[in-house]
């Protein structure tokens, strides 16, 4: 049975590489496509939030089908210099919710859309005062936003827990108060709604993890997962069904893509593995878990300027299948990955050469 399962898995990998679509340009109006964040609707249609660098806006691309053969682009918010560190989730009705940093007002904001194209969003300021960078958003079972982010004034990691779906009020907690933490946060919610946050400790040059003990994060467990030289950039976190964290990240010292697989829900022990070490790789990692909790990771190859993807053959990613997904110019920064219900990847990213927002998917 195990041999059959392995054969099936490697067959799926072969199909994935064979069935990659040609990359699609979703937006080429000016300089667009930084800070992409992708989510799939209940029908599998991609939705992408991103920054418009020409007009300093938050924008949204809404695809009309699974492969995004057509899409419509919408400006969500245009008041000031906004749209940094966008993070997108879809509500139970497939309406977008977008967290972002407002560089004019110097604060963390959230846009809660009232329809699929976000024609009239509700805008809320979560916290003002040079906070909100490196944010990551998830929605609770009641569609209430939960957002991790860096407070760059105090240099700490925070989490905001909204009390309702439009974030009328929120509770803000300092999750890690060690100076220099909270960079490159990635947040997921456990099966009981407790926030789990991976992040980079810029003081100690280490990968850290914070696991909240309840849904409001009144207390939390904080651990250093990897401190081998300078590691932990561009973290991306996924949780297994039994709430074990799995984290992809950049090894700054060796310019490698690494993976940490936790043995338990608070990551008392973790297996750390180098996934790709060919050149300077592992920037802008984005991770999702396929069937049997096998990691799939999109990332940027800084040596060649390519978008790459690693498909793991087991939970620990002992023998990954690695391919270049797009090599047309300098492409792949700000990669964001989602998996369809069948486990196939869809990736949004920036075409640096042309300043376009692009997307690549797998035919189903």
Image (cartoon, rainbow, N blue to C red):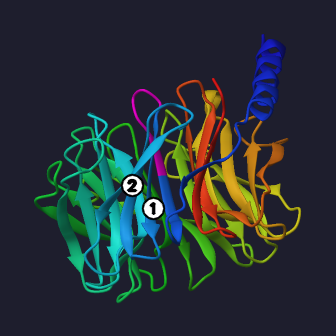
x and y, in percent, of residue 251 in the image: 73, 69
The residue sitting at 30% across, 46% down in the picture is 117
Q: Is residue 194 shown left or right of residue 287?
A: left
Residue 56 picture quarter: bottom left
Q: Nearer the viewer, residue 225 or 317?
A: 317
> Which mark sits nearer the N-terminus, 1 or 2?
1
> Please, which residue is most extreme toward the top here?
1
Q: Is residue 4 above or below residue 27?
A: above
Going by the image, does 222 lie left or right of 158? right
Considering only vertical position in the picture, is 35 above or below 138?
below
Can you see residue 350?
yes
Residue 318: horizontal and vertical position, in percent? 82, 42
Residue located at (67% from left, 48% from top): 297
SS at mark 1 in the image: strand
Q: Classify residue 216 by image quadrant.
A: bottom left
In space, the residues marked 1 and 2 are separated at their CA atoms by 6 Å
Residue bounds of the magenta highlight: 38-44
> Residue visible at 84% across and 67% down?
304
Residue 288 image offset from top left, x and y in percent: 58, 43
Q: Quick one: quadrant of the N terminus?
A: top right
Residue 3 horizontal/vertical position (percent): 84, 15
Residue 50: numbered disc: 1
Q: Are marks 1 and 2 in contact (CB under 8 Å)?
A: yes
Residue that mark 2 sits on: 60
């Amino acid at each position: 049975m195990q041999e059959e399962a392995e054969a099936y898995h490697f067959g799926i990998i072969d199909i994935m590489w064979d069935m990659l679509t040609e990359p699609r340009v979703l937006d080429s109006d000016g300089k667009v496509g930084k800070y992409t964040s992708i989510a799939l609707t209940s029908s599998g249609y991609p939705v992408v939030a991103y920054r418009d660098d020409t007009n300093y806006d938050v924008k949204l691309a809404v695809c009309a089908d699974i492969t995004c053969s057509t899409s419509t682009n919408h400006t969500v918010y245009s008041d000031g210099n906004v749209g940094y560190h966008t993070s997108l989730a879809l509500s139970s009705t497939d309406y977008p919710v977008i967290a972002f940093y407002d560089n004019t007002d110097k604060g963390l904001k959230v846009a809660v859309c009232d329809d699929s194209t976000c024609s009239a969003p509700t805008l809320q300021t979560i916290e003002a005062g040079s906070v909100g960078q490196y944010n990551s958003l998830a929605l609770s079972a009641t569609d209430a936003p939960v957002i991790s982010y860096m407070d760059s004034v105090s240099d700490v990691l925070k989490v905001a827990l909204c009390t309702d779906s439009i974030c009328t009020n929120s509770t803000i907690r300092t999750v890690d108060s060690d100076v220099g933490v909270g960079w490159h946060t990635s947040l997921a919610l456990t099966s009981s709604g407790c926030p789990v946050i991976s992040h980079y400790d810029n003081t100690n040059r280490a990968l850290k993890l914070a696991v909240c003990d309840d849904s409001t994060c009144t207390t939390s467990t904080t651990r250093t997962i990897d401190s081998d030289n300078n590691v932990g950039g561009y973290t991306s976190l996924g949780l297994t069904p039994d709430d074990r964290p799995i984290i992809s990240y950049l090894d700054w010292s060796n310019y490698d893509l690494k993976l940490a697989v936790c043995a338990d829900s608070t990551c008392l022990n973790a297996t750390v593995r180098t996934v790709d070490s060919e050149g300077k790789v592992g920037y802008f990692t984005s991770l999702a878990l396929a069937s049997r909790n096998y990691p799939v990771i999109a990332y940027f190859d800084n040596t060649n300027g390519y978008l790459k993807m690693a498909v793991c053959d087991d939970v620990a990613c002992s023998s990954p299948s690695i391919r270049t997904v797009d090599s047309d110019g300098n492409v792949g920064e700000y990669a964001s990955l989602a998996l369809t219900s069948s486990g196939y990847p869809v990736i949004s990213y920036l075409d640096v050469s042309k300043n376009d927002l692009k997307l690549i998917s797998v035919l189903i």
